């Protein structure tokens, strides 16, 4: 693709749009933000004025029709990801979509189908793949230094951190779920990514909603986006156990609120040649040298060599596939869907027959 300047439109004018996507694409050579859309006209107008252009919309369909866009970001409630992405892709527009890819695996597959029809790029904003620790661990795993990875654990747990209680985050019809679909997509995606995304065979899980009426101070960055009179019909904690076709198992826990010592996110990898623990921003490698177990703490004082936003632009211009493939996000959503189903039925959910 030899086009000098890519015309960029952003759907959604909230915190994730302004603080991440618009900021992320600003300054990349050959990218120009030319349009913004938000259902709240005030927010869209504020961004347009701040960024120095005139075109703002309250209907994404109008924006896609009127603007000659090359690509968009989708920074909306989850329920809108699929319709916006499919509409844009069918119009020949590349899409960078916030996580989760969609409300469920069925919608996610519809987005992949639209991507395949159009021949355009669809990348999911699984931003933790672009961190220094993930870059290091992915290469460590690809070089076989863990040996046979047979079990992993991952989680993201908050003491009190329900995002926007009463807003769209806690409304199942708009979000699809609670911390499992909000936080779980990050670190569950990472451990699957490290292993090359093997197919899930079965899942068992449980979800809990115990803090919907809790009045304790909320530490979430999105807590002010809520509504005291609004709906909270999603879980505040989810646990699960996943079996993969390669024999590996995953143990997971994600919560917005729980009586724990402190907030933390983590993953643990257990392999026949070595293991890894990421917790509290620190990475530890466990291995053997001269018949002795040793622990190595890699310095994470470097910047990951791949930037999420620069990477997507390179994919568009060079006709390359994104690191965060939507087909992998479909597998991720199958696991999440299965955990919700398992919690509802109190039974193991078979996703595909094992070999």
Image (cartoon, grey):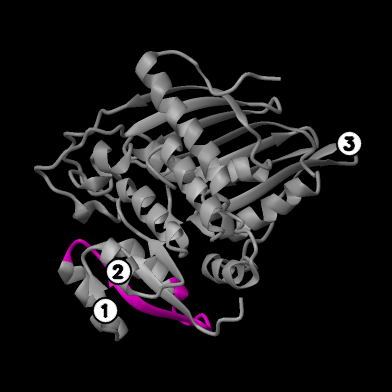
Q: Nearer the viewer, mark 1 or mark 2?
A: 2
- Disc 3 packing (10 Å; few <14; some 14–19; many ≥20): few
Q: Tell me what residue is drawn at x 57 percent, y 41 percent.
A: 267
For the record, the magenta segment spans 24-40
- Disc 1 packing (10 Å; few <14; some 14–19; many ≥20): some
Kindly state the secondary structure of the residue where label 3 is placed.
Answer: loop
Q: Tell me what residue is drawn at x 64 percent, y 40 percent.
A: 197
Q: Is residue 297 visible?
A: no
Q: CA distance from mark 1 to mark 3?
A: 66 Å
Q: Is residue 202 magenta?
A: no
Labels 1 and 2 touching (C-beta < 8 A): yes
What is the quadrant of the N terminus in the image?
bottom right
| Front position in the image: 111 or 346 | 111
Q: CA distance from mark 1 to mark 2?
A: 9 Å
Asked which quadrant contains residue 14, the reply is bottom left
What is the quadrant of the C terminus in the image?
top right
Q: Residue furthest left?
A: 229
Q: Which residue is mark 1?
A: 55
Q: Which residue is mark 3?
A: 291
Q: Which residue is mark 2?
A: 63
Is 259 on the left or on the right of 129, as rendered? left
Q: Is residue 194 above or below residue 115?
A: above
How many tags in the picture?
3
| Front position in the image: 162 or 95 | 95
- Residue 254 in the image: state x and y as whole percent: 42, 36
Q: Of marks 1 and 3, which one's residue comes earlier in the chain?
A: 1
Q: Nearer the viewer, mark 3 or mark 2?
A: 2
């Amino acid at each position: 693709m030899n086009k000098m300047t890519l015309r960029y439109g952003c759907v959604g004018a909230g915190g994730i749009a302004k603080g991440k996507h618009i900021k992320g694409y600003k300054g990349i050579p050959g990218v120009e933000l030319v349009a913004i859309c938000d259902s709240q006209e005030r927010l869209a107008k504020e961004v347009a004025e701040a960024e120095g252009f005139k075109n703002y919309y309250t209907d994404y369909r109008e924006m896609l029709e009127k603007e000659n866009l090359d690509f968009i970001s989708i920074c909306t409630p989850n329920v809108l990801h699929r319709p916006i992405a499919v509409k844009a892709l069918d119009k020949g527009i590349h899409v960078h979509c916030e996580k989760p890819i969609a409300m469920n695996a069925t919608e996610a597959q519809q987005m992949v189908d639209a991507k395949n029809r159009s021949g355009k790029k669809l990348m999911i904003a699984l931003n933790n793949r672009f961190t220094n620790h993930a870059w290091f661990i992915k290469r460590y795993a690809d070089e076989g230094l863990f040996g046979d990875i047979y079990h992993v654990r991952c989680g993201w747990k908050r003491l009190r951190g329900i995002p926007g209680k009463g807003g769209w985050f806690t409304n199942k019809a708009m979000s699809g779920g609670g911390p499992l679909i909000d936080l779980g997509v990050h670190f569950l995606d990472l451990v699957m990514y490290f292993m090359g995304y093997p197919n899930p065979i079965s899942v068992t899980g449980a979800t809990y909603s115990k803090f919907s009426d809790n009045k304790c101070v909320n530490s979430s960055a999105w807590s002010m986006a809520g509504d005291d009179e609004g709906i909270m019909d999603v879980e505040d904690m989810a646990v699960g156990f996943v079996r993969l076709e390669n024999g590996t198992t995953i143990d997971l826990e994600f919560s917005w609120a729980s009586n724990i010592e402190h907030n933390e996110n983590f993953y643990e990898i257990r392999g026949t040649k070595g293991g890894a623990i990421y917790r509290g921003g620190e990475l530890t490698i466990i291995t053997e040298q001269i018949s002795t177990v040793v622990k190595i703490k890699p310095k994470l004082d470097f910047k990951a060599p791949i930037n999420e936003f620069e990477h997507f632009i390179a994919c568009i211009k060079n006709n390359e596939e994104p690191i965060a493939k939507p087909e992998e996000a479909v597998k991720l959503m199958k696991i999440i869907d299965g955990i919700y189903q398992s919690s509802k039925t109190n039974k193991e959910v078979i996703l595909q027959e094992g070999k």
